[in-house]
Image (spheres, rainbow, N blue to C red):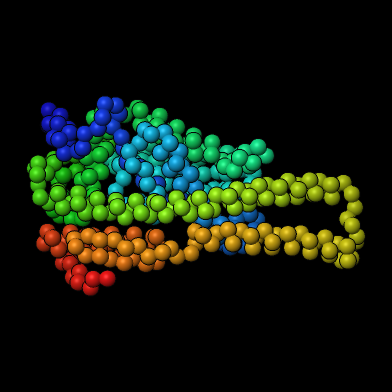
Amino acid sequence: MRSLLLLLLLCLALPATAAGPRLLDVGLAIFDPGIPEDESTHSALEIFPRIRHAEAKYLPVTLRRELVDSDLWGVVRVMPELGVLPDVTVQGRIIESNGRQQRIHVLVSDATGRRWLDREYTAVSSEASLQVGEPYRQLYAQVAADMLSYRRGLNERQLREIQGVSLMRYAQSLSPDAFAGYLGRDEDGYQRLQRLPAQGDPMMARVERIRNQEYLFIDNVDEQFGELHDEMATTYALWLQYDREQKLFRQDYEQRAANREKQGPEGSFAAMQQSYFAYRNFRIQEQDLDELALGFNNEVAPTIVETSGRVFRLTGTLESQYTEWRQILRQIFAIETGLPTVDGQGSNFSAPLQ
């Protein structure tokens, strides 16, 4: 009975949707590039670190667009870090990515802690798929399909609770003490709503305003990731095609070389020339990849944002800008409510207008 009452109150607290399934907001974190710390292994594993870092920001946008195109989710955003904002979070780790195949480990969970997906996905390229420009899109289409399949197995009560828990988790991230006791855990360890703030609670109104300010910044970040993705798309597709052709040529060459004698005895000019050409091709490829990665690895333009009548200019990478903006919002919340900041200290926020 108590659980039913909470859900009825939650229906009033959360925005209404049109007839049909409740739409959950999704946050996709920048992927883990999967780069081993031991640099001596990179060459054998055919890993170019700068390219992997670029792919870690490129590939979540590909998945985001699959989810958006389905028109069956709420707002889908690529985020520098997940935190507690989204109803559903998606994390990925690149295991292998080259012109022949791509392997990604994907972890999807919702705000209650329920794990939707925790598995590896693999896609193999072909000459035809490379010509189209997105040889691994079927991989992300499969992830999107599996996410939708899981969500369809949840009932309306579970969907509403995910959204309610998401909102209260965000409130607790702003002020753990003020919102203690609103969430608990069930016998399976998932977070559940214990109670809700009173309707019209001014504290919750501030929470939602701060949350919306954070979402506005994330929307700007998401848009920049999309622009960088589009700038990189053509060159990235060419690199995948080039990488695949190089590997096929190398395999064919090794097979042919095994069936015939070397061009010359070890140490001869012919043998050294053969080794030099192989090294030269590798270096050219490596330089091309470095140039490809510049768009994602350079610092982006400053972001100008406004809140509470104050204007702020954020600089540096998208990740550092987001961290700075979150700190500003939490300090503003502490000033408005008189509550301590998350670290337990009073706010000393007195940065001049910029």
Figure quadrant of the N terminus: top left
Residue sitting at 49 percent across and 39 percent down? 140
Residue sitting at 36 percent across and 33 percent down? 72
Who is closer to the viewer here, 68 or 141? 68
Question: How many marks can you see?
Answer: 0
- Which quadrant holds residue 144? top left
Who is closer to the viewer here, 321 or 105? 321
| In-image side of 129 versus 312 (left or right) | right
Q: Is residue 185 visible?
A: no
- Which quadrant holds residue 217? bottom left
| In-image side of 260 versus 227 (left or right) | right
* x then y, percent, for residue 334: 16, 61
Who is closer to the viewer here, 222 or 143? 222
Q: Is residue 120 visible?
A: yes
Q: Is residue 334 above or below residue 223?
A: below
Residue sitting at 64 percent across and 60 percent down? 288
* x then y, percent, for residue 265: 90, 61
Figure quadrant of the C terminus: bottom left
